[in-house]
Structures are given as C-alpha cells and as structure tokens.
Image: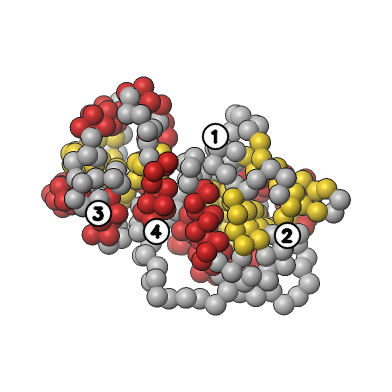
Amino acid sequence: MSPIRILVVDDSAFARKVLRDLFSRHPDLEVVGTARDGLEALEKAAELLPDVMTLDLSMPGLDGLGVLRALGGRARPKVVVVSIADSASEQGLAALEAGAVELVHKPTALATDRLLEMSAELVGAVRAAAAARVPALPDPTATAAPVAVSVAPTKRIVVIGASTGGPNAVARLLKGISADFPVPIAVVLHLPTGYTGAYAERLDRECGLAVREAADGVVLGAGTAVIARAGQHLKLQEHGGRLVATTDLHPVDTPHRPSVDVLFTSAAAAVGGAALGVVLTGMGDDGLAGSRAIRAAGGHVLTQTESSCVVYGMPRSVWEAGLATAEAPLSRMAAEIAARV
C-alpha cells in the first residue's frame, strides 16, 4: 500500500522538524511538505495533494481556522489539529466543527522529549484521519426539532461512546433530544485533556438538555447529560435508588482514558437491563466489551450505520459481534433512542 502523504503546518520551524522526524520513523507515513502559515498551507495542499494535513491553530496571518474554512469540508486533505489546549480549547472545538477529523494536544513547552511523548497519539490520529470518511458539513441554518418521549421510561440510563468524528456526532445527537428526556445520559469521547470542559459548556448552551463535564459524586437526573472528563474514567454506581457518577484513573491498562468499555460495563453492573448503550463513529473497538456486558445484563445496544460514520470502527466491532439490537444513521439515532426509552 502507498504511504499516507502528510503536509505538516506549523509556524514553529522547530515543531515542523520534530514532526517530520517523528513521522519518518514509520514506513506507512511520508511527509511530502511543510508550511509555516495558513496561506502557504493552502498553496502546498493544492500543489502536493496530501492525504492528511497536521495543522497548528495559532499562526500569523491566516490561522488554522481560516485554513479549515478555506478548505470548506472537502474530502482531501483530512485535517488533524495539533493544538495547545490551555490556550485554544474553544478554537480546537471550533476546528472540529469546521471539518477537522482529529484533535491532538501539543505540549506547551516545545521540547523535543515532550513532542516525542505525543508520538503514538499523533501517529494514531494521522492513521485514523487517513481512513476517515468526512461527511458534508451540517447546514448551520438547519434545525431539527428535538425528539420527545411520550411514554413512561423503560430504561434508567443511556450511555454513549464515540471517538474519531465523535464530537460532531455527539453534538448532533444531543441537540436532537428534548429537554424533558426522562433518563440521564452519560458520554465518553476520546478528546485530549483540557477540551471536555469547554465542549460540555458549548453543548449546554446549544442543547435543550443540561450538559456538564462529569465530576465525582454528581447525581445523574432526567434531562441531563454528563461528558466524561478527558484523562479520567467515568463510572456509574447506584446509591439509594439514585445513579451517581464516579471518576477514577483505574483501570490504567486501557487504550483510552476515559474508556467506553469502562462506562458501559459500569452501567450494566449498576442498572442491569435498564441500560441502553449507543456506539457512534470511531476507530478501533472501544465499546465492544462494554456492549457485551450490557447485552449480558439484559440491556440493549444501538450502533451507527457505516454510511453515516466518519470511521466505521467501533460500531462495526459491535455489529459484527452480533451485540447490536439495531443500527441507525446519525440522523435517526435520537428517534431510535427515544423509541427504546
């Protein structure tokens, strides 16, 4: 197979060199060019036709968001944003909305050892982006009426997991659920540390649901959604008839923290068959073991259809294992959830 062709865009010459060296260690990756600002990035993208662009957000002149808007959601190149979370979390989320496929946290201190620490994460993000299907960007003027639930709930919790393409998918799904939704929702996304708080705040402003970043000891109630904090597992426990969120660093051997498997498995243990799992777009198979736990407890699992996924990895693993109760495109997922709650 041909290597993944990469264009590295960063205003720091040092960062460009380190990223080039980092990618050169992998035979399936090839850096075909570099750019130091947004205008040069667009010129090089048109000239070199890379598969993936790694994109810094803070650059003089045309910044990263300007590049994404100029690309206009085209299928190539796929964009991986490499950003400093502490100063640009809102920018990073805006970049995902504008069509970026992945988001990687760049260390504040541009030291070689710190940049090399992110090697596995960045290489994984580039590979995921190269495999991604980038759907058309949603029409910002189009609004869909949230789906209401008119019957007594048969479930006690909806748990959702997503990875590549997940921030936009989860946002679209939660916006389609009405404020009077009768059970709480818990969400795990694979986002870098520093972004989940801003992501939850943004959704809280835009959704009928009350959306919060998960915190230890928070009681989950109807009409609310909690987003797992990056770097911490989200687990559910039952205390006195109430569902309570707990956050934990353990287990430490999971490929992701937070882990969809950890959330789903805890939901199955807490409420048994009253759990509904939803597996959305994402690379890999996080959610497979958790879906197995939910089904073994008598609960149900929905998966996103391949045609509406950015990466059909996580849903595929659940569907092919025969664990999905049903599958649905993202545009129908809120209705499918409502029908089962």
Q: Quadrant of the N terminus?
A: top left
Badge 1 vs badge 2, beta-carbon distance below 8 Å? no
Residue found at the very far top of the displayed protein: 113
> Gap between marks 4 and 3, in whole Å?
13 Å
Badge 2 vs badge 3, beta-carbon distance below 8 Å? no
Circle 1: element type: loop
**Direction from residue 204 to residue 51 in the image, left or right:** left
The image quadrant of residue 35 is: top left
Residue 255 is marked as: 1
Circle 2: element type: loop
Rendered location of residue 131, percent (x, y): 37, 47
Q: Amino acid at mark 3?
A: Val
> Gap between marks 2 and 3, in whole Å?
41 Å
Rendered location of residue 265, percent (x, y): 70, 44
Residue picked out by circle 4: 97
Residue picked out by circle 2: 221
Residue 280 is marked as: none
Which sits in the foreground, 233 or 108? 108
Report if residue 106 is visible in the image: yes
> Gap between marks 1 and 2, in whole Å?
30 Å
Q: Quadrant of the C terminus?
A: bottom right
In primary-sequence order, the first of circles 1 and 3 is 3
Report if residue 125 is visible in the image: no
